[in-house]
Amino acid sequence: MIPAAFDYHRPGTLDEAVKLLKKLGGEAKVLSGGMSLLPMLKLRLASFAHLVDINRIPGLDYIKEKGGNLCIGAMTRQAALERSDLIRTKYPILADAVPLIADPLVRNRGTIGGNVANGDPGNDQPAIMLALGATFVALGAKERSIPASQFYKGLYSTALAPNEILTEIRIPAPPPKSGGAYAKLKRKTGDFAVAAAAVQVTLGKNGAIERAGIGLTNAGLTPVEATEAAKYLVGKMPDEKTIAEAAKMAAAKSSPSADRRGSVAYKKEMARVLTTRALRKAVQRAQGG
Amino acid sequence: MATHKISVTINGAAREAEVESRLLLVHLIREVFRMTGTHVGCDTSHCGACTVILDGNPVKSCTVLAVQADGAKITTVEGLEQGGKLHPVQEGFHEKHGLQCGFCTPGMLMTTSALLERNKNPSEQEIREAISGNLCRCTGYVNIVKAVQYAAEKMR
């Protein structure tokens, strides 16, 4: 399969890339890892007159803690996240998820920026960003920050303007007694999730939940933030009954569609089961166990 | 539509080509450079038959643009043999019957040779994870794992 013809541009700096996007208007698409974009172009599910490749722009590939945040450059490949000691030791929710994304060869190309900016509800990292309360930094005419909770507008539709490039993901560094987990059900390597849940919790001094974030993957047209379930958890002791109730509330927020991965009822039930598992694990990690 | 002049180093040799933006890396390798060891399987980045090493990392060449490889070092299955001597993974696949129909083999060889560059002593689990993006429709995974273990031992 061969994509429809397009022009390819390889700007050397972010400034050049933004200028190019402005000039080309809505006819251009940013090419990051290309692991979703190129298959879509090949299947002719999408076509763009111009691709603006940001792979050679220096300074977009990093994982570092800065000013109370974990900052990840948009061009950071999934394989780099997978091998990062910082991610493994301090951000278990990401360490859980990355090895479950696509397959190792795809992770050598695919980037976290592409994963979150693509606007595909089947991608794993958007739900995680919702659970973590992350912010996306976008550069257009000027730089602005967009909370993940306000980023996803519809299927493949995000708050990014056509002339903007997502440059950085900022995750608030979790306070002590925090824990996160990602639980995903998929039929086989390389498939999207039947259902998956991302959970991040922080416990207070008495062991009760102080903050909770829950995101669901492939549970609707956009990544789903289970805000009511998260709110319900706050102030409560994380016992089995509370976890079960929150998981039920989260699943109620999901609106999956039936496909070869299962019926609506099955997917909603799996969203409940996976939220339960992720919540248990997140609490366990927050308790230091 | 404009074309792009690119240069790559493929299996140690410098090559140039004038490519259309939409030309895929696998088509550059097979149809422009006429190296047909790299296979096109599913053509949708699932099966891994088209795997090549791009600047040290195994990638699916059906899902990379040729123009993106400008300036890169590429190794294909044709580049594994050195001075008439098979690469240990090739020898392993031969000795342990790591192939039946052979269609997935070039991709398997590229992925597993890259694995052994990074991990001299992979466990069975690590080998299985490494090849999880390479599908063998003959389902000959048991012998593929044995072949990689044979190669790992040989390389140590």
Image: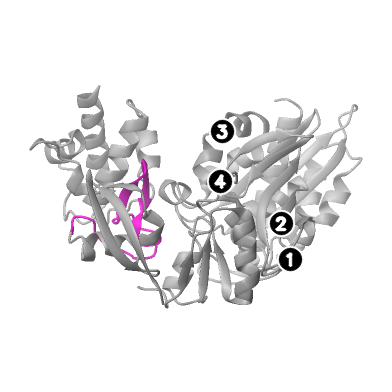
Q: Earlier in the sequence, mark 4 or mark 3?
A: 4
Q: Earlier in the sequence, mark 1 or mark 4?
A: 4
Q: Are marks 4 and 3 on the same chain?
A: yes
Determine the residue positioned at 21% across, 57% down: B103
Position of the C terminus of chain A, as image quadrant, is top right
Q: Around disc 1, counting alpha carbons within 10 Å, would you say few (fewer than 14), some (14 to 19), or many (20 or more)?
A: some
Q: Around disc 3, counting alpha carbons within 10 Å, would you say few (fewer than 14), some (14 to 19), or many (20 or more)?
A: few
Which residue has dot 4 on it?
A58
Q: Around disc 4, counting alpha carbons within 10 Å, would you say few (fewer than 14), some (14 to 19), or many (20 or more)?
A: few
**In the image, which is nearer the foreground, mark 1 or mark 4?**
4
**In the image, which is nearer the foreground, mark 3 or mark 2?**
2
Q: Are marks 4 and 3 in contact (CB under 8 Å)?
A: no
Residue A91 seen anywhere in this rendered image of the structure: no
Q: Is residue A209 above or below residue A147?
A: above
Magenta span:
B35-63
Q: Which kind of residue does numbered mark 3 sit on? A: Ser
Q: Main secondary structure of the magenta part?
A: loop
Looking at the rendered structure, the secondary structure element under dot 1 is loop
Which mark, residue A159?
Answer: 1
**CA distance separating discs 2 and 4:** 16 Å
Determine the residue positioned at 35% across, 37% down: B127
Position of the N terminus of chain A, as image quadrant, is bottom left
Q: Which kind of residue does numbered mark 4 sit on? A: Pro
